[in-house]
Amino acid sequence: MTDNLPLRGKVALVTGAARGIGRAYALRLAKRGADVAVVDFDLHSYKDYQLEAASMRGDTVVDEIREIGIRALGFQADVTDATTLNEAVQQIVGEWGRLDIAICNAGGGVGSPEETRASIVEKDLVDVVVARNLTGTIHTCQAVAVPMKEQRSGKIVTVGSQAGHRIEDNGGYAHYGAAKAAVAKYTQYLARDLGPFGVTVNCVAPGYISTGRLAPILSAMGDAQLLDDVPLGRYGTPEDCAGVIEFLSSDLSDYVTGAIIPVDGGLTYS
């Protein structure tokens, strides 16, 4: 571990943290000194993806955090279940006495581009994606807002997507883009709501991020074609996203709230 521990004494919760970008968020906060509660539907979900499994340095992210000398808790919880999330938050506060940082990362899409165009996407796919992304984010934010309002301090970061404000040429994933756009707008409403309590609320909107799960998908979609739209000329990494999360979780961002921050190599404005 380094001596650079600006988050020492802070307590963080990260949803969807068993693998990929969420794992990078949890590890970055831990390496900066925060105690971290890892929340995921399956703490071993990385096993479903060969590249994700190869990157792991412990049985779960909880073990990886403890290995670097930081306290960690693990919860297998579904963010679409408000009761389970509330219980997890209560346990975190009961165990560690406070909650300072919440990264609402859990989400994801289902369906192919061809079957998720706006005019034809089926209700079942819409319901799943809205529940995972928008409803799950709302549940998480409402659960963590309780102790943060009592403390009169806190940092909440939601996770949107470039899909929430940029339409792909093929018109697919309309349900996912709409859900992520709603996450961004909900973030701004929540920032207004919690500002008087000293709680900041911001949203990161990743672009094409090469995780162990997404790398093969991006390659199949056509690397050259996708990267032609990215001014920086490369895919993002989980660490690219984690750097922005670190900023929004630290005192460096104390006067930043209600912001939607693209992490996409310039894709949004290209």
Image: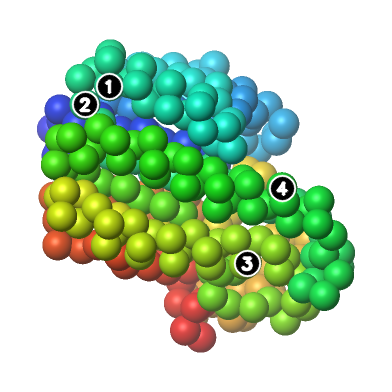
Q: Give the residue at mark 1.
A: 93
Dots 1 and 2: beta carbons under 8 Å? yes
Q: CA distance from mark 4 to mark 2?
A: 32 Å
Which badge, 1 or 2, comes first in the chain's sequence?
1
- Residue 268 vs 6, above or below: the answer is below
Residue kind at label 2, given as amino acid type: Arg
Which badge, 2 or 3, comes first in the chain's sequence?
2
**Residue 214 in sight in this render:** no
Q: Secondary structure under badge 1?
A: helix
Q: Position of residue 260 (x, y in %)?
A: 38, 67
Rendered image: mark on residue 98: 2
Mark 4 Cα-neighbour bin, 10 Å: few <14, some 14–19, many ≥20: some
View extreme (bottom): residue: 270
Mark 2 Cα-neighbour bin, 10 Å: few <14, some 14–19, many ≥20: many
**Residue occupying the point 63% across, 47% down:** 131
Which badge, 1 or 4, comes first in the chain's sequence?
1
Q: CA distance from mark 1 to mark 2?
A: 5 Å
**Residue occupying the point 55% across, 22% down:** 76
Q: CA distance from mark 1 to mark 4?
A: 30 Å
Along the viewing direction, whichever of 147 and 168 lies nearer the viewer: 147
Q: CA distance from mark 3 to mark 1?
A: 34 Å
Residue kind at label 4, given as amino acid type: Val
Q: Quadrant of the N terminus?
A: top left
Q: Give the residue at mark 4.
A: 128
